[in-house]
Amino acid sequence: MNTSKWKSILGFVALDKYPNLPCPYCHQESLNIDESSIISREVSNNYKKIASRHFNLESTKQKEKAVVQEKLIGKMLGSNSVLGLFGAAAVIYHEVVKPNYHFCKFTAFMTCASCNDNITVTGLSQEQAEQDTEKKQLPSLYKIDHFSVPVPMFEISPTVPASIQFELLGAFNYFHIDTNSSASKLRRAIEKFCSELGMKPNSLARQIKELETKYSTEASFLNTLRLVGNEGTHSDNVNEDDLLLAFDIVEEVLAIFPRLAKLERLKAPQAKLENKFDKKKARTDAKTLEHAK
């Protein structure tokens, strides 16, 4: 999994810095925002009362930065030195001339350059308020909260059962707006994993314990993922970094399904070779046939 790609879009990003994402249809990494399709509206006061996690985080960050700068200016002015006065003036000037951003809600299409299919996305943007033409107009910044079709954060083999894929894609989609719900969906994927490998209905911890007898390494990883899922389901302490680590583990655990599928395919050539070269088996089969007559 390309962890750095997903980390790069955790915050607000300019369009020219936005990476190509994996297309949910053709799986090529050529999905990007169609700039001509973007529609945005400034957020209302009503929205601010029930705002998304990213809006609250960014607003808090900006308020904290303003407090730090106010304290810095006060400290510089209080020094009564010429250098302090010049420093305070520089900070104040920077605040006056810096771009004035406001928050908007936006919707847009993301189009795949490979298959030309598309999905819709919604989220938040920070757009520069209209200002003097002499000042440099900076690009708008975007944070996608929701993809209409889940974008896979790593390639999922078609041998992975559909029940697991469904829950995992849900975890990927929630990653961008609700990390605890993402962790909860991840737990559901682990439950489906145990069921698909024939574990009896039981608590997830006991299913994983049962799995140890045949797949000890996978069981150890699954137990770690269970803890992440439990935290997301029963508490609220899971963040994006936690999920990226968890998804990296999931990707490796899911490798068991291509391996099992290949072993199943190899049974036919195995039988063919045994029938040809296993003399003892051939004699046993001949005797069985003779007795049957």
Image (cartoon, helix red, strand yellow):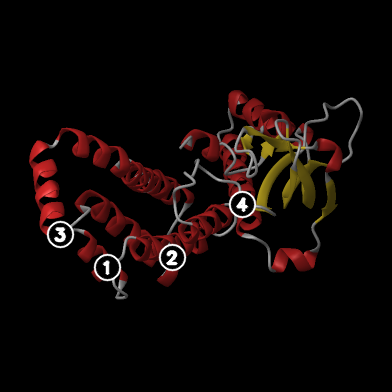
Mark 4 touching mark 3, by CB under 8 A? no
Which residue corresponds to mark 4? 150
The residue positioned 60% from the left and 54% from the top of the image is: 60
Which residue corresponds to mark 1? 207
Disc 3 is placed on an element classified as: helix
Q: Distance between the residues labelled 3 and 1?
A: 45 Å
Is residue 178 found left or right of 89 in the rendered image? left
Residue 292, numbered circle: 3
Mark 4 touching mark 1, by CB under 8 A? no
Amino acid on which the number 4 mark rests in the picture: Pro
N-term mark: 4 or 2? 4
Amino acid on which the number 3 mark rests in the picture: Ala
> Residue 81's quadrant in the figure?
top right
Amino acid on which the number 1 mark rests in the picture: Gln
Q: Which numbered disc, 4 or 3, marks the residue closer to the eye?
A: 3
N-term mark: 4 or 3? 4
Mark 4 touching mark 2, by CB under 8 A? no
Label 4: how many residues lie within 10 Å, few (<14), some (14-19) or many (20+)? some
Q: Which numbered disc, 4 or 1, marks the residue closer to the eye?
A: 1
Q: Quadrant of the N terminus?
A: top left
Q: How far apart are marks 1 and 2 (CA)?
A: 13 Å
Which residue corresponds to mark 2? 188
> Residue 190's quadrant in the figure?
bottom left
